[in-house]
Image: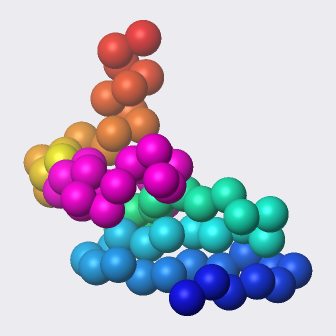
C-alpha cells in the first residue's frame, strides 16, 4: 500500500522502530527511545538500501547501548 500526500508520515514496525516517509518518496528507518528522561530519535538508514531485518538488527544494537547507559551519539563523538 502506498500513501501519498503533502505531509510526511510514519509506519510503525515494532519496539520503537518506524519507517519515516517523506512526500517525495524518500524513506528512513528511525528508532525512538528515551535517554536520561528525554525522548531521542536515531536514524538507522534509508529504505530500500537497509531492509527491515537489518533495521531491526541496528535497532537492537542501539537499544543495547541505551540500556548500558551509552548513547550512540555520545559514543560516536568519543570515537572521533
Q: For the C terminus, which image quadrant? A: top left
> Within the image, what quadrant is residue 17 found in?
bottom left
Q: Is residue 46 magenta?
A: yes
Q: Is residue 3 above or below residue 69?
A: below
> Within the image, what quadrant is residue 15 found in?
bottom left
Which color scheme is applied? rainbow
Residue at 28% across / 79% down in the picture? 14
Residue 29 visible here = yes
Along the line of sight, the residue nearer the viewer: 64 or 9: 9
Q: For the N terminus, which image quadrant? A: bottom right
Residue at 46% across / 61% down in the picture? 30
Marks counted in the figure total: 0
Q: Is residue 6 above or below residue 19?
A: below
Q: Is residue 40 above or below residue 9?
A: above
In the rendered structure, which segment of residues is drawn in magenta?
A: 39-60
Q: Is residue 31 magenta?
A: no
Amino acid at each position: 500500500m502506498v500513501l501519498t500526500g503533502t505531509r510526511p508520515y510514519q509506519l510503525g514496525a515494532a519496539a520503537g522502530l518506524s519507517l519515516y516517509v517523506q512526500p517525495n518518496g524518500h524513506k528512513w528507518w528511525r528508532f525512538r527511545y528515551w535517554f536520561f528522561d528525554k525522548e531521542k530519535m536515531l536514524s538507522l538508514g534509508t529504505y530500500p538500501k537497509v531492509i527491515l531485518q537489518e533495521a531491526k538488527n541496528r535497532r537492537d544494537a542501539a537499544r543495547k547501548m541505551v540500556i548500558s547507559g551509552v548513547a550512540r551519539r555520545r559514543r560516536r563523538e568519543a570515537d572521533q
